[in-house]
Amino acid sequence: MRLILLGPPGAGKGTQAKNLVEKHGIVQLSTGDMLRAAAAAGTPVGLRAKEIMARGELVPDDVVVAIVADRIAQPDAKNGFILDGFPRTVPQAEALDRMLHEKKLDLDAVIELKVEEGILLKRIEKRINEMAARGEPVRVDDTPEALHKRLEAYRAQTAPLIAFYAGKGALQTVDGMVGVADVARAIDGVLGLGGGQAPPAGGRASEGRPGVIAKT
């Protein structure tokens, strides 16, 4: 099972990725973790990434893809993986496709968690208020202002991936505004793993198929 989860910050991608990891024995691959591990391991591509990061520069797409290629070849990724934080742009998605093609691998699905940004902002405001009431510290990147900036970056850089994967017939859209368990069942449904079941292309979620919107 090889998956990509798409959706804006706060959509619940991390929660659903953790659920899939626990249920299906696949690994969650974070590009940040992979870059640091490759640098620490001293692999040729890892050393190149380490030099680039030491200069404070962004690691080029070809280096990230090479690190992903090394990582998915490791034994613990044999059953599959979920990519976390990659691809972020259409050029990265194109590079990922080329690398997977060379390895004779395909993505099983690209799943978009569709959410309403206004409700996301209300959720984070509520969480901040609750943390303040309990006297807990609030992270500097966990504020409505920070979320606004992250949403703007997502719309500019990552949202075009939805059209990219839809054009390839790989995109499944799930309603991310329902409960966590319903989203998990819907994801299992579009993957053919039980739970919810994907309606036909262009369809809408119906009773008995919570959270599934459509295959695009």
Image (spheres, helix red, strand yellow):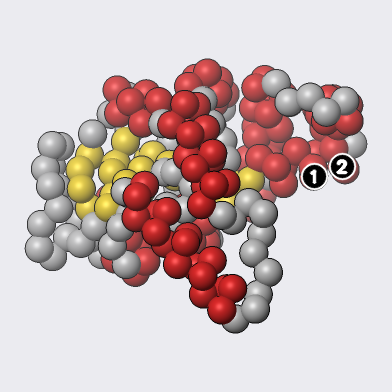
The quadrant where residue 85 appears: top right
Q: Which residue is mark 2?
A: 41
Using a 10 Å C-alpha cutoff, classify the residue at mark 2 as few (fewer than 14 neighbours), some (14 to 19) or many (20 or more). Answer: few
Q: Residue at x 29, y 41 (%)?
A: 172
Q: Secondary structure at mark 2?
A: helix
Residue 86 seen anywhere in this rendered image of the structure: yes
Q: Residue at x 37, y 23 (%)?
A: 164
The x, y position of residue 67, in whole percent, is 71, 32
In the rendered image, the vertical position of residue 205 relative to residue 66, given as above or below: below
Q: Nearer the viewer, residue 149 or 80?
A: 149
The x, y position of residue 154, in whole percent, is 48, 35
Using a 10 Å C-alpha cutoff, classify the residue at mark 1 as few (fewer than 14 neighbours), some (14 to 19) or many (20 or more). Answer: some
Q: CA distance from mark 2 to mark 1?
A: 6 Å
- Horizontal side, residue 131 vs residue 90: left or right: right
Q: Residue at x 70, y 21 (%)?
A: 60
Query: In the drawing, what numbered circle is on residue 37?
Result: 1
Residue 16 seen anywhere in this rendered image of the structure: no
In the rendered image, the vertical position of residue 177 relative to residue 22, given as above or below: above
Q: Amino acid at mark 1?
A: Ala
Q: Secondary structure at mark 1?
A: helix
In the rendered image, the vertical position of residue 145 relative to residue 107, given as above or below: below
Q: Amino acid at mark 2?
A: Ala
In the rendered image, the vertical position of residue 78 relative to residue 22, given as above or below: above
Q: Do tag 2 and tag 1 residues touch (Cβ < 8 Å)?
A: yes
The quadrant where residue 42 appears: top right
The x, y position of residue 186, in whole percent, is 28, 58
